[in-house]
Image (cartoon, helix red, strand yellow):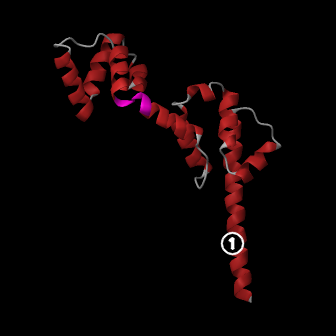
Amino acid sequence: MEKAFAVMKCNEEEKLRFGVYMLKGPANHWYRGELRIRQGKEFESWEQLRKALFCKYFTRDKMVQFERKFINLTQGSMSVDEYEMEFDRLSRYAPKLVDDDQSRARRFEGGLQAHIRRGLAALHLTSYAEVVGRAKSLDTVWGDTKDQSVRFRKKRDRSF
């Protein structure tokens, strides 16, 4: 919604009206209940409604849970592309851990598979975009090399 507000250049009143309009399902039921509790008194601003929504749907426990998921995130069996998407999704729950480009790059690199980290070590990259780009390249090369190795072994095994 914030993205839509920016594109449409909404003023504060429009943000609130559009935000209320976009509430669907359980969020809309919650909003209607809030109006009853507030005796019909509308929210004064989009920011006030946004904060109330976050308190309702992102409890402290839920935020801590997502923060822990981010802290413990590693590439594991994911591709670098998949790891990057999950890293970006969860990083918003631990903003202090990735508050600048270099911290973001180090945290991302630290969660990569060991063979990719080894490939990045000699490069001394400091920006997130560079680390992600090089990691993706290494992941592709690693996959190609692994595929070639498997084909070679199958071919060798058939010749015996």
Q: Is residue 24 visible?
A: no
Q: Quadrant of residue 9 in the image? A: top left
Q: Residue at x 66, y 36 (%)?
A: 107
User: Mainly helix, strand or loop, the magenta region?
Assistant: helix
Provide the secondary structure element on which disc 1 rests. Answer: helix
Q: Amino acid at mark 1?
A: Val
Count the labels in the image. Answer: 1
Q: Quadrant of residue 13 in the image? A: top left
Q: Is residue 71 above or below residue 156?
A: above
Dot 1, how many residues are within 10 Å of its Cα: few (below 14), some (14-19), or many (20+)? Answer: few
Q: Quadrant of residue 52 in the image? A: top left
Most distant residue in the bottom direction: 160
- x and y percent of residue 4 in the render? 39, 25
Q: Is residue 117 left or right of residue 72?
A: right
Q: Is residue 25 visible?
A: yes
Q: Residue at x 30, y 16 (%)?
A: 16
Reading the image, the residue beneath label 1 is 150
Most distant residue in the front direction: 61
Q: Is residue 140 left or right of residue 66?
A: right
Q: Is residue 122 left or right of residue 95?
A: right
Q: Specify the quadrant that holds the C terminus.
A: bottom right
- x and y percent of residue 37 in the render? 19, 17
Q: Nearer the viewer, residue 6 or 85?
A: 85
Q: Residue at x 37, y 15 (%)?
A: 47
- x and y percent of residue 158 in the render? 69, 86
- x and y percent of residue 139 in the render? 67, 53
Q: Nearer the viewer, residue 97 or 159?
A: 97
The stretch in magenta equals 57-61
